[in-house]
Image (spheres, rainbow, N blue to C red):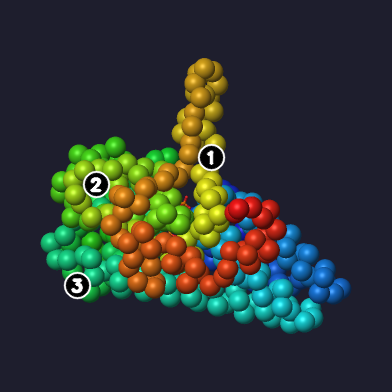
Amino acid sequence: MSVRETAEKIKRMEIRGAGRIARAAVEALRFHARDLEARDLAEFRRKMEEAAALLLATRPTAVSLPNAVHLVMMPLGEAEDLEDARQRVISSADEFIRSSKGAVERIGEIGAHHIADGDTILTHCNSEAALSCILTAARQGKDFQVYATEVRPGNQGLITIQTLSEAGIPTHYIVDSAVRHFMNRIDRVFVGADAVAVNGAVVNKIGTSLVALAAHEARTPFIVAAETYKFAPRTTLGELVEIEEREGGEILPAAEAARLRRVIVHNPVFDVTPASYIDLIVTEEGAIPPSLAYIIIREFLGWSIEEFHKTFQIAHQDQG
Ligand code: RI2
């Protein structure tokens, strides 16, 4: 798929989920690099940067997207000539896709330790990392059930219940606002992440913080499944993760909105769950308390803050 087509699909959420968005963008860059016609290395770099910028502009919240694009584009800086540059992008893209899939699998193995026979799990939205924990536990023969939310306005819960049902897991489907009503039946909550900040706060689908609040009140462990490339390096510089606000028409049809002229529709699609409501973040490098988010950014993400700045020409902030 071309870069433009991939970007459009990500924007329209035909390709969605933080990990899938990252892999799709990387795959598009890979094909772009393979087929790109350029006179020299400089032109190749410029065209690749344009393609990267197009992908980065699609959705602002899932940090897996800039992190993945950065990983693929980084080796361009060391390229000696055009063909070398092409090969470097292709192999770093292949490496990202391979390790991303491996990370989801490893998270499943680690997260499954936190699911026991007789458990009732709750999940919100459709996260392949969170589902990897649940599906791995099911494959291990554990006998448990899952409550899945509807997830307004995108109804991603439908994809989740389909996956759970196909895996033969007893599944309950509830509206988002019923979470507190059912929380006393829940032994553990598993969700994914679009971004993890340096202070351990997790940005995930709208409603996640309410689920966490209800879990906290009920003393129900709240577990986040997040690959290391969901951690946001820029938050170490005090930058906030941008919360995407989508079209009001996704909530209130245009005809209704036209009739109700004084009504302002808000459609933020993510919210922030503070670290104090999170018991564990399961990454492919192990399960950590949210307070160790900084270690993941520095040690496992594999690049320095300076490097990140250079690549994306982000204005350097004086840390004074
Ligand atoms: P995985 C999704 O965002 C959801 O918020 C989900 O929890 C998160 O990405 C992580 O998903 P959206 O694209 O990477 O549906 O674990 O807005 O699949």
Q: Residue at x 31, y 50 (%)?
A: 276
Q: Which residue is mark 2?
A: 216
Residue 265 visible to the viewer: yes
Q: Residue at x 47, y 72 (%)?
A: 300
Q: Nearer the viewer, mark 2 or mark 3?
A: 2
Q: Are marks 1 and 3 in contact (CB under 8 Å)?
A: no
The mark nearer the N terminus, 1 or 3, is 3
Amino acid beneath label 2: His
- Find the residue positioned furthest to the left: 118
Element at badge 1?
Answer: loop
Q: Which class describes the residues within 10 Å of circle 2: few (<14), some (14-19), or many (20+)?
A: some
Vertical position of residue 214 compared to residue 8: above or below: above
Q: Which residue is mark 3?
A: 141
Q: Are marks 2 and 3 in contact (CB under 8 Å)?
A: no
Element at badge 2?
Answer: helix
Residue 295, image x, y percentages:
43, 67
Cβ at disc 1 under 8 Å from ligand 1 = no
Residue 246, image x, y percentages:
53, 40
The mark nearer the N terminus, 2 or 3, is 3
Q: CA distance from mark 1 to mark 3?
A: 40 Å
- In the visual, does 84 lie left or right of 223? right
Q: Which mark is residue 309?
A: none
Element at badge 3?
Answer: loop
Cβ at disc 2 under 8 Å from ligand 1 = no
Q: Residue at x 15, y 46 (%)?
A: 184
The N terminus lies in quadrant: bottom right
User: Based on the displayed image, in which of its 4 quarters is residue 191 positioned?
Assistant: bottom left
Q: Which residue is mark 1?
A: 246
